[in-house]
Amino acid sequence: VSGLTGPDRSSQAASDPPVPARTWRLADIYPHTEAWEEERERLVARMAELDALQGRLAEGSHTVLAALELLFDLHRLAGRLHTYASLMADQDLRAPGPQAMKENIVALYSDLAARAAWVDPELLGLAPETLARHLASEPRLAPYRRYLEKLEKRRAHTLDEAGERLLGLSQLIRGTGETVSGLLRNAEIPWREITLSDGTTLSVDANGYTRARTLPHREDRLQAFQAFHGVLRAFRGSLGATVYGSTKEHVFSARARGFASTLEAALHPNEVDPAVYHMLVREVNAALPSLHRYLRLRARILGVEPLAYHDLYPPLVPEVKVDYSWERARETVLAALAPLGDEYVDRLRHALTDRWVDVDPRPGKRAGAYVNDGSYGCHPYMLLNHQNDYHSASTLAHESGHLMHSWYSQEVQPLPTSRYVIFVAEVASTFNEGLLLRHLLAATDDAEQRLALLGHHLDNLRGTVFRQTMFAEFELEIHRRVEEGEALTGESLTDLYFDLLRRYHGVEQGVMTIDELYGNEWGFVPHFHYNFYVYQYATSYVAATALLRDVIRRDGAAVERFLEFLRQGSAQPPVDLLRSAGVDMTSPAPIQATIREMEEVMDSIDDILARRER
Ligand SMILES: [Zn+2]
């Protein structure tokens, strides 16, 4: 569960052999590959047991229990097998053996899904009262209560056999928009190459664009933006058709299943009320003056007037180099997390020193950072590519949040409720990043270091809360248009996106300027095919910030509520879990708290700048 703020850089070519203490001990899952192979064979054999239960769920609670126990046990084994193979593969992507093992389990997963396809429909074939009676009379069904509850919520949107068959068949004609968009962006669009001021050349594809956005020389950034958006402009007809195609699919599914809107359909599986989405969009719009203050501050610090769209990404102040060796990063993060209590810190220390983490970059190793918690009953594993800088330390704090969330949750919850859903997945990780930042701010009086940290905080907030909400609003509007029978074209998408860009960034109010060409930016965002996904980046950040502000006040009850939230996994719907932890995502309060935080950070920066000018 990663990717929001985790880095995505390629492995450094380190020629030193790996330090064993800083690599994974995979024997915690299986002692050796032969044991993995034996378990795989056992799993394949046991899948046949599912067939014996088909058609028998009406017999009574004993067959329902048997089917659910078997189903989840098969998933537990498949998860373990997959985790082992996947971690093996990520240690060295060049080795063919582990890749084949991984592909083998992916195929096995689809066999399992096909084999078990009858279970949910047959459960739904039982009356709600029958299932309720089983739950009341058979205590061993308790771990499956949430599974059955979620199934029950699907009942109203489940069609008869012929309808479900037809919807199943529609899989054949789905996903083309997303696939074509990916092919265009990643393979077929001839991206331009530019020559930077230092004489090096840069291919401005999506990765090059992301890198070029932060370059210190304004001319370099301008050149990259013009090149990138110019190409997007040339391909916007095709790119627009892919977004239109994906959006039509969402409308088709929502209508076929009888949802009132695409938004309701998309949020339904995660049990999130559309009101949460609308609240986010409304409150972030109300907070635009704070974004405009930030943009003016950025113009002032960077010394550019007027601020332009290609000036949004270079760091506010150059990072003050602090050498975060692995040991130093680890000890700093552990010290920063002290507000969560000794038990939390001791457990994390154990995880970070007992070979649960693959620390260093090396040739062939998977890039980026993540936590894999797929081996229920064993412990989670963490992958890093530690580079001895602040970014790496922050990534460690982030991934530690995921790791501890998984560990606490798997310890307390049975498998069916141990996996937390995406809506809450980034809360624990963002929370820990925030604790690290506060810890470092408290530890230094150095004006430059403080500016760097505060600037980093603001940039994050802009990128996560404002930009992702702008994306969320864009998605809301394109779905509304298709629902109302309007076609989407590259041109209309660009007009819409440009309007949003102007409104969010205060162009009318003279806050900054945005070249009309940049309205084509939607074309490179893969998330616009994901069906209302990105808002969760913003809500996670907001929830984490609101929770953190309570914990920082040394509110002991807030800490305990937060730890309980980690232990709950998915034992309740996500909005209920957060409410128990102390944030009500259906109210404007958490977003308002986040904006207060932003204003306080800007006050601190103003103070530092004023003192510097005196
Ligand atoms: Zn993450």
Image (spheres, rainbow, N blue to C red):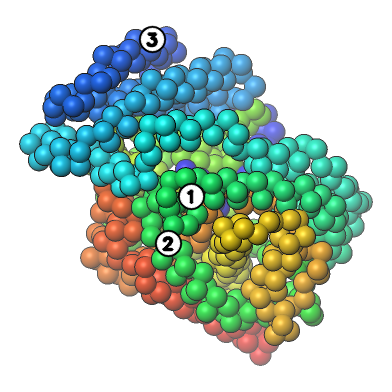
- Residue at disc 3, secondary structure: helix
**331 sits to left or right of 19:** left
Sequence-wise first label, 3 or 2: 3
Of the two numbered discs 1 and 2 in the rendering, the one whose residue sits closer to the viewer: 1
- Do we see residue 443 in this rendering? no
Which circle marks residue 41 in the picture? 3
- Residue at disc 2, secondary structure: helix
Across and down, in percent, residue 600 comes to 50, 79
Question: Which residue sits at x=47%, y=45%?
Answer: 256
Q: What residue type is labelled 2?
A: Pro
Across and down, in percent, residue 322 comes to 60, 57
* Image: 51 above or below 121: above
- Residue at disc 1, secondary structure: helix
Q: What is the crowding at mark 1: few (fewer than 14 residues within 10 Å), some, or many (at least 20)?
A: some
Residue that mark 1 sits on: 255
Which circle marks residue 65 in the picture? none
* Quarter of the figure with residue 94: top right
**Mark 3 vs ligand 1: CB under 8 Å?**
no
323 or 309, nearer to the observer: 309
Q: Which amino acid does label 1 sit on?
A: Arg
Which circle marks residue 274 in the picture? 2
* Quarter of the figure with residue 297: bottom right
Q: What residue type is labelled 3?
A: Glu
Across and down, in percent, residue 205 comes to 78, 46
For marks 3 and 1, give the CA distance: 42 Å
Q: In the rendered image, which quarter contains the C terminus?
A: bottom right
311 or 400, nearer to the observer: 311
Of the two numbered discs 3 and 1 in the rendering, the one whose residue sits closer to the viewer: 1
Q: What is the crowding at mark 2: few (fewer than 14 residues within 10 Å), some, or many (at least 20)?
A: some
Question: Which residue sits at x=34%, y=25%?
Answer: 118
**477 sits to left or right of 424:** right
